Each structure stands twice: as structure tokens, then as C-alpha cells.
Image: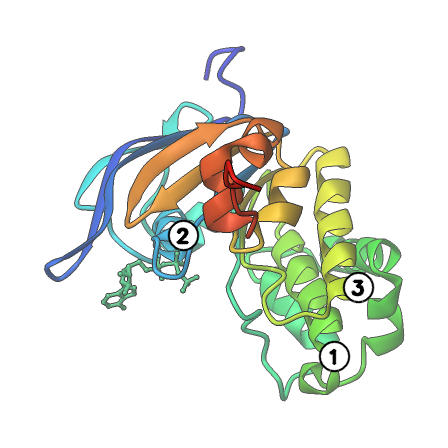
Amino acid sequence: MTETEQFDLRIEGLNVYYGRIHALNDVSMTVPEGQIVTLVGANGAGKSTLLMTLAGVLKAKSGSLTFGGQPLPDAPHRVLAGGVSLVPERRRLYANLTVRENLMMGAHLQTKMSVIREDMERMMNLFPIIRERVKQYAGTLSGGEQQMVAVARGLMSRPKLLLMDEPSLGLAPLIVRQVFETISGLKEQGITVLLAEQNAMNSLEIADYAYVLETGRVALEGTGRQLLEDERVKEAYLGIQKKSVEQ
Ligand code: ATP
């Protein structure tokens, strides 16, 4: 790893297929260490496919994936051991396990119980609601609380890079705002974030850099601010129509 490379994630010429469906088509992007990079796109654009490929769940047909200058492993447990953790779409908590047990799942590579206890305490300080709910079954929590547990579970492996798939999905507007504040807070703690979202407005507001995916290809890229001001993004993703000349 060179000094300038640090723990940047680099994706070059990535192609992923489901059978004959070409889900990611020659995708290239960079997630620099310490930044929040957002992936905006409609349903089916390929956001989850990209995150699951990075997490080692799906196999790439071609392309190069490196993290900190080293090839990203292609098995989920090795990706996790390498410092990359996925917070999957729709949280995927074990509803009939307690919050504590769900958090333990995130620490399954950690062998020292003292470290797990320390990390659990850290999570309860980061998300005070988890302290209140730690003995409850995860399925009894509200959607927003479950999202916090999913993020905490992702953090239990002490990742350098957190991949987040649609964390605001199905949440009430007030809770959505809290989720995005939480993500901004992760950056303050030095965690790099790659965030896939259909909620373009909120996710671009917190993004250092962003990519728009359309049917498996990168259609646009720029800083969060540049994309928020881009006419195509406004029309297609922010629901803002161009004013007609007659108006
Ligand atoms: P969403 O927000 O709905 O999850 P997305 O941007 O994450 O959308 P993907 O789920 O990555 O999009 O889907 C990309 C493309 O791959 C779509 O055309 C989708 O229909 C297809 N696809 C996804 N999963 C599968 C699968 N298991 N088998 C076949 N095709 C799939």
C-alpha cells in the first residue's frame, strides 16, 4: 500500500451478471478513505448488486476491486476480516434473537470476549436506544430502531469501510433524518462509507462524492453538491421539474 493509496476502495471495469442479465456494466468508481460516497439510482439500477459484489456475496465476471491497494477477497468472511462490512437492505436482523445476540453476530470473527464486550459498550454509547433495548427481541423494535441495530451490528467487526444498502428504506421522515445524521457521524469517527440510496436528496446532502447508476452503468458523477444542482438529477431523482419557458 502506498501512502497516497491508504484504504481507498477502487472499482475498475466491473461487470456482474445474473445469468444473461448484465446487472453491472463496466462500472468504475473510487471511494477514498474517510469519505462518504453515495450511489444514487432507481429500483433495479444495480446498487445492491454492486454492494453485494464488494461484500463477496456475488462474483464478478470481470473487473478489478482493490481495497488499500490489495485485491478485495471474494468470500464474505474474508472481506469482513479485511475491514469491509455490509449493512444489508431491509436490515436482515434475526427477529427472534435479542438485540444483544444480533450484535454478537456482527462480532463473529472476534475471538476475545473482552473486545466484544468493549465494542458492545461502544455501540450502546453510540446508539443509546440500543442500551434500552438490548434484551428485547429485535423483531419487537420499530423500523428506525432496527436500522440502528443493523448499523451497530455492521460496526461490531470494527470495519474501515461500511457498505450501507438503502438504510432509509421504509422509515418515517423524522427517523430518516436521524439515520442520515448517524451516517455523517460515522465519518467523524473515521469510518469510510459507501451508501446506496434511492433517497437522493438526503444522501447527496451528506455525500463527499456521488455516482448515479442507471441500468447498471455509471451515468453521472460529481460531488454531492454538484449532483444536487444537476438538472438531470433534479428531474429524475429529486422530483424537481424544469420550469417551462412560458411560465
Ligand atoms: P433496488 O433498490 O430495487 O434493490 P438496485 O439498484 O439495488 O435496486 P439490483 O437489485 O442490484 O438493483 O438489481 C440490478 C438488476 O439485476 C435488475 O435488473 C434486477 O432485476 C436484476 N437482479 C437483481 N437480483 C437478481 C437475481 N437474483 N436474479 C436475477 N436478476 C436479478
Q: How crowded is mark 1: few (under 14 residues within 10 Å), some or many (20 or more)?
A: few
- Queried on whether the Cβ of the residue with tag 1 lies below 8 angstroms from ligand 1, the answer reads no
Badge 1 element: loop
The residue drawn where x is 69% and y is 81% is 138
Ligand 1, seen in the image, is in the quarter at bottom left
Q: What element carries label 2?
A: helix
The image shows residue 100, relative to residue 56, as above or below, that is below
Query: Any mark on residue 174, and which?
Result: 3
Q: Residues within 10 Å of mark 3 (few under 14, many from 20)?
A: few
Camera sees residue 10: no
Which residue bears the numbered disc 2?
A: 47
Mark sitting earlier along the chain (1/3): 1
Dividing the picture into quarters, in which one does residue 58 lie? bottom left
Which label number is shown at residue 142? 1
Residue 155 image offset from top left, x and y in percent? 66, 52
**3 vs 2, front mark:** 3
Under mark 3, the amino acid is Leu
